[in-house]
Image (cartoon, rainbow, N blue to C red):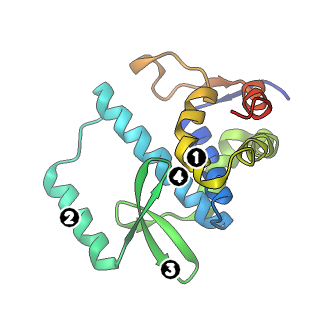
Amino acid sequence: MVEILVNRAPFLTLWASVVARSLGYDEEESLTLGKAVAGQTAAAKGVRLGILEERPEAERRAIADRRQDLGAETVLFMGRAIACLRTADGLRALADARPIDPASVKRYLVAKFKEELGPVHEKLTALAVVLPPEELNDRAMDLYMRMRPAVPSGEAGWGRLGRLDTDAIDRLRIQGM
């Protein structure tokens, strides 16, 4: 495999979508769950680093009210509470109070990984099947931390491309994590 330079957010999106598939969600549901986990994770880190401001309480309440009006439910996934909506097309994670479009997530992943999307997806899928689904869900963020692209720590790494060590994914699989 060639050197892969990618930001952590698309890598987490892909990994989380693989984890969701292992838990039994269909491809489109998994893509939206992956995007939601990556979005929540990036937002929390941005606030911790002082790059982003926490949403005002009134805005958070308004989003929660809109979600409630829509009949949204909460899915516990990878240590996160993900707001979701059951649609005619299946479960969709929400961005604020809007269902995430799985096709847009797929385009995002293709744009970020290019021709390496398939091979990286295969490696992550092979890793995911090593653990039973519930244990995978419990350990997925820890595993992400152990294989995520290398970028400088703190604010210096925010939004930067990092080298994805695909051998690290293989080592985790071989070691049984």
Left or right: where 156 falls relative to 88: left
State whether residue 166 is above or below residue 77: above
Q: Secondary structure at mark 3?
A: strand
Say whether disc 1 or disc 4 marks the residue closer to the N-terminus: 1
Which image quarter holds the C terminus? top right
Residue in the picture at 59% in, 48% down: 135
The image shows residue 111 at horizontal and vertical percentages of 67, 45
Q: Which residue is mark 4?
A: 35
Q: Residues within 10 Å of mark 4 (few under 14, many from 20)?
A: many
**From mark 1 to mark 4, how far is it between C-alphas?**
5 Å
The numbered disc on residue 87 is 3
Say whether disc 1 or disc 3 marks the residue closer to the N-terminus: 1
**From mark 4 to mark 3, how far is it between C-alphas?**
17 Å
Give the amino acid at mark 2. Answer: Ala
Q: Secondary structure at mark 2?
A: helix
Q: Which residue is mark 2?
A: 62
Say whether disc 1 or disc 2 marks the residue closer to the N-terminus: 1
Give the amino acid at mark 4. Answer: Lys
**From mark 3 to mark 2, how far is it between C-alphas?**
21 Å
Q: Nearer the viewer, residue 75 or 86?
A: 75
Say whether disc 3 or disc 2 marks the residue closer to the N-terminus: 2
In the orientation shown, which residue stands out farthest toward the right? 1
Residue in the picture at 56% in, 41% down: 139
**From mark 2 to mark 4, how far is it between C-alphas?**
22 Å
Q: Which residue is mark 1?
A: 13
